[in-house]
Amino acid sequence: MNYSSKEFEFHDPNSSDYIKVVIPEVANAAFGLYVWPCAPVLAQHVWEHRKQMEGKTVLEIGAGTALPGIVAAKCGANVILSDNSSFEDCLRLCRKSADLNHVTNVTVEGISWGIVSPTLTALPKLDFILTSDCFYDTKDFEDVIMTLSFLLQRDPEAQVWCSYQERSSDRSIWPLLNKWRLKADEISTPNMDCMRTTHTVHTTHIIQLFRLQLDVSDEDLIDGKKGS
Ligand SMILES: C[S@@+](CC[C@H](N)C(=O)[O-])C[C@H]1O[C@@H](n2cnc3c(N)ncnc32)[C@H](O)[C@@H]1O
């Protein structure tokens, strides 16, 4: 696989903290083989919350080139990068991303949305789940949400951080979130001025960030406990 590399530098305006990440890309190829505009935004959010990453277990789904997951790994998390189990090129590129950044605390797994596979059920307890631009094709929306719902029912304390580009108001994820009893709280987007990169995108301003959680309402109170 011939790839080119993009560089991303994450800085802290108040200290000398800094990391550099190199991301391999394959131009003119499948969806997962280049960096989408959602990825730098989520990666910068991870960087700004890096103290929460240390020693934590982080899963990135639909990782593609895996910029957010690699940032989490560089900030001390144990990271599982995942993409569709049938997309061998994407899984190879995830591995390449980890190798180029010399992060050894990273494993790569095939996890296809909407499928409760042995790999999904065997995941360790998760602290964070990252999803960058996984809501791009309406046919997959419910599968992504089902996978997140499955993981949150298993690990209700896990935080799901999701960067999202709404491409059309006809393609909303909100009814499906309700159906799967998830709720989304918008998180303010990070200051992208602190990132230096060879990557050019002009659309980061239309990216939204959300934290997804199980929507456990008062109706679910059973003997004073939530959920079942
Ligand atoms: C729009 S790309 C986003 C890639 C990357 N997260 C980013 O933001 O740059 C969508 C990603 O979802 C992956 N994907 C597509 N269908 C999938 C499925 N059914 N299960 C898991 N991953 C899938 C693609 O291979 C691709 O990596």
Image (tube, rainbow, N blue to C red):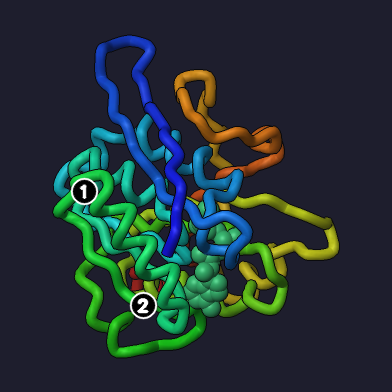
Residues at badges 2 and 1 in contact (C-beta under 8 Å)?
no
Instruction: Give me the residue at 35% from left, 61% from top.
Output: 94
Does residue 185 show up? no
Left or right? Give the position of 31 relative to 194: right
Q: Amino acid at mark 2?
A: Gly
Q: Is residue 218 above or below residue 112?
A: above
Instruction: Give me the residue at 15% from left, 53% from top.
Output: 104
Instruction: Give me the residue at 51% from left, 46% from top.
Output: 39
Note whether ligand 1 is within 8 Å of mark 1: no
Q: Is residue 77 above or below residue 138?
A: above
Query: Where does residue 114 sit, x and y in percent of width and height?
Result: 51, 83
Which of the labelled discs sits on residue 193, or is there none?
A: none
Residue marked by disc 1? 77
Question: Toward the viewer: 64 or 178?
Answer: 64
Question: Toward the viewer: 191 or 70?
Answer: 70
Query: Where does residue 2 sit, x and y in percent of width and height?
Result: 44, 59
Q: Quadrant of residue 158?
A: bottom left
Please identify the quadrant where the N terminus is shown: bottom left
Q: What is the crowding at mark 1: few (fewer than 14 residues within 10 Å), some, or many (at least 20)?
A: many
Q: Amino acid at mark 1?
A: Ala
Q: Quadrant of residue 63?
A: bottom left
Note whether ligand 1 is within 8 Å of mark 2: no
Query: Where does residue 105 sit, x and y in percent of width and height?
Result: 16, 54
Q: Disc 2 versus disc 1: distance between alpha carbons?
A: 19 Å
Left or right? Give the position of 102 relative to 166: left
Left or right? Give the position of 95 relative to 8: left
Which of the labelled discs sits on residue 110, or is there none?
A: 2
| SS assignment at label 2 | strand
| SS assignment at label 1 | loop
